[in-house]
Amino acid sequence: MDYLKCSAQELEQEYASLKKQYEDEKGKGLSLNMARGKPGKAQLDLSLGMLDVINSSSEFVGADGMDCRNYGILKGIDECRQLFAEILGVEKENVMVGGSSSLNMMFDTISCMMTKPIVEGCKPWYEVENRKFLCPVPGYDRHFGITGYYGFEMIPVPMTEDGPDMDMVEELVASDDSIKGIWCVPKYSNPQGITYSDETVRRFAALKPAAKDFRIMWDNAYCIHDVTDTPDELLNIMDACKEAGNEDMPILFCSTSKITFPGAGVAAMAASENNMKVFTERYNFEVISYDKLNMLRHVKYFGNYQGVLDHMKKHKEVLQPKFEIVLNALETELAPTATAQWTKPNGGYFVSVDVLPGTAKRVVELCKEAGVVLTGAGATYPLGKDPKDSNIRIAPSFPPNSELEQAMEIFCICAKLAACEKLINQ
């Protein structure tokens, strides 16, 4: 039933039917959570063997001869830096391995540039009045939280099927030296699952910012997180920037948070020698060294980059059916109503749904009352303000499949119910 072509009477009848279905679901007293992209138990179980690779009888010396139980080696042990270099497609010398959180490293990176110029002759960002940051939307709420915390005006940049609107990005950064950077999730973007096209990456690399200290925050969180048999390919930003003479512009991040254990994985960043010199000066005052035993544990468990890729195939086997459950429900229940659109990603952790404009908050509210917790409507926009009140991020990974099916049934009922309400009131 195409809601947009229905008469008022037909909508009233549909609403009554949906309301009864909704009350039936609500009466079940369910408690289902799809609020964040958390790995489910089956995924966490994949890495249990890692807990056994180091024990009291182990050899704790890394390839560089350092006893990993002791202080030292700020940038991380060599073999772990090499592993992340291959994951990110950079040279080992450009890599620093940190703690468990890439988000923490991103926060520290912004904090560093707030207080110390990343380019000689520029001001630290806290001295820049009306400082701005570009934010592709819909995007990752925690990225926006960092720049919001540091007082940046956040400028939304619409996403296209090839990545951020590069005409807008090029025009803005070339004309305003108070624009200091842009957030990017270049492969399987959060939440749409879009991978930037080769042309988009090359246009990023060729940017001519008015600000000499403009930086691309390249959060490659899902660089090896495929969920279909037709994975996307992402052009190497570091190589492209070197070719364009902009080697200092990108700062890359990733972690094993959704590969091994969230909160107990390993994070890394990569940047040019000039950038890294500024960052490591700060880190020298901040920390003696990060958890080298955990770095060693990861290296021993995986062996090499191919070991990581083999491990990710197991994750795909768990996640692929979950994405199929979500997409099948949307296609079956919402497509006929013509009131919603959604992405069909080849990887990542989310499905982005645009419900009828003006109803996203209502859908989330109805779901919550029926026992299904979603990420808040508007979370994918700076300051939580979705101008169309349309986008909802669905995170399929955490619930068991049987619960995911129930949650999606309720979500679709709520989306249709909210759409009927909106159209009837119009």
Image (cartoon, rainbow, N blue to C red):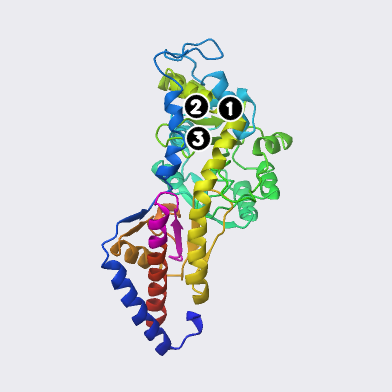
Q: Are marks 2 and 3 in contact (CB under 8 Å)?
A: no
Residue type highlighted by circle 3? Ser
* Picture residue at 48% right of the left edge, 65% below the top: 329
Mark before the other along the chain sequence, 2 or 1: 1
Give the residues in magenta.
388-407
* Picture residue at 57% right of the left edge, 55% below the top: 345
Residue pointed to by mark 1: 83
Q: Are marks 2 and 1 in contact (CB under 8 Å)?
A: yes
Image coordinates for residue 171, horizontal then vertical, percent: 63, 52
Residue type highlighted by circle 1? Leu
Residue pointed to by mark 3: 255
Mark before the other along the chain sequence, 1 or 3: 1
**Image quarter of the C terminus:** bottom left
Residue pointed to by mark 2: 298
Q: Are marks 1 and 3 in contact (CB under 8 Å)?
A: no
Image coordinates for residue 261, horizontal then vertical, percent: 43, 35
Say if 286 sits above or below 181 in the image: above
